[in-house]
Amino acid sequence: MNKNLEIRKCLHSGEEFHPKRNNQVFASKKNRISYHNSINNKLRNELKSTNNQLIINYKICKELLDKNKSATVHREFLKGRGFDFKYFTNLTANKAKTGYTYALYDTSFEKIDENNYLISKL
């Protein structure tokens, strides 16, 4: 059978086409790009609120640190700025093994007592 006579349906648009290669599943480069963009946009939209809060938390930490290596900040001050303690990128036991250090990209925050947090650069 001649491969040029084979007709396939495009995975993205559903249009029929004659493949130029035996593994071709899209009718055009535009359809291939649109298909993968739609999949990635769906994932980005699902993660949007989480990523936005991580960025807000990170900006607050960077602003408080400025040029210092660490800063002690009251819990209510952080909350007032929009910091959400549920969002962080990594969790490790602190050096004293009495609590946890919450990493936020290249910064971290650690609970010192009930009301104060230590924010540091990693």
Image: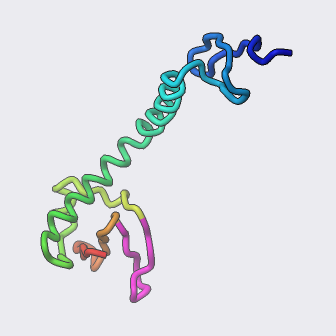
Q: Position of residue 46 (x, y in %)?
A: 44, 38
Question: Where residue 21 sits: x, y (%)?
Answer: 69, 26
Residue 9 placement, left or right of 121: right
Relative to 103, does residue 47 appear above or below in the rendering? above
The answer to which image quadrant residue 98 occupies is bottom left
* Residue sitting at the far bottom: 96
Residue sitting nearer the eye, 6 or 115: 6
User: Where is residue 95, by image quadrant?
Assistant: bottom left
Screen quadrant of the C terminus: bottom left
Give the quadrant of residue 75.
bottom left
Question: For this view, does 83 lie left or right of residue 86?
Answer: left
Q: For this rendering, which residue is in front, 23 or 92?
A: 23
Residue 117, position as x, y percentages in the image: 25, 73
Q: How is the image coloured?
A: rainbow
**Quadrant location, the N terminus:** top right
Q: Is residue 109 above or below residue 86?
A: below
Where does residue 107 sit, x and y in percent of width and height?
Answer: 29, 69
Residue appearing at x 57%, y 21% in the figure: 12
Left or right of residue 63: residue 55: right
Magenta-highlighted residues? 90-103
Q: Is residue 91 magenta?
A: yes
Front residue (pair 113, 33): 33
Q: Quick check: is 67 in the magenta stretch?
A: no
60 or 30: which is nearer to us?
Answer: 30
Q: Residue at x 55, y 20 (%)?
A: 28
Residue at point 25% right, 57% down? 83
